[in-house]
Image (cartoon, rainbow, N blue to C red):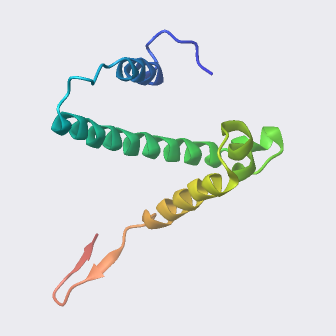
Amino acid sequence: MFVSDLSDPLDLVREGLDRLAAEDRSSWSAATRTDRLIELRVVQERIDREVLRAVADCDAVDAWQEAALGGVSWLATKTGLVRNAAAGLFRKRLKRAVSLPTKPQIRRNRSSVRVA
């Protein structure tokens, strides 16, 4: 865990979440409330992508090895995720890694060859 001095982006996220939790929404209209819900889902998806990126970063250096666990077991043990959710993160990570081209793909056109 990092020491909090608000120079870490995650500390800023935590501060923002504290402010959200303290919001008084009692006077908000229904439209404003649903707009906030949509905005929160967008932020949640961005955080989910960062979690996936962190899993990939840890997996790239086999960070789980120090605890003598595989990645799924480590995530389940250390983060409180149920095994199925932890395994799902790895499936997403592998799916994403497979979908990213490692070499340029050559597309042939009738009159020319181009690199995509």
Residue closest to the far top: 5
Question: Which quadrant would residue 100 be assigned to in this image?
Answer: bottom left
**x then y, percent, for residue 24:** 30, 19
**Left or right of 34 on screen, residue 89:** right
Question: Which quadrant would residue 33 be assigned to in this image?
Answer: top left
Residue closest to the far bottom: 110
On-image quarter of the N terminus: top right
Q: Is residue 96 above or below residue 6?
A: below
* Identity of the residue drawn at 52% across and 59% down: 92
Residue closest to the far right: 68
**Left or right of 59 on screen, residue 32:** left
* Identity of the residue drawn at 30% across and 40% down: 37
Q: Is residue 23 above or below residue 76?
A: above
**Left or right of 55 on screen, residue 82:** right
Nearer to the camera, 62 or 92: 92
* Identity of the residue drawn at 76% across and 51% down: 70
Q: Is residue 77 above or below residue 85?
A: above
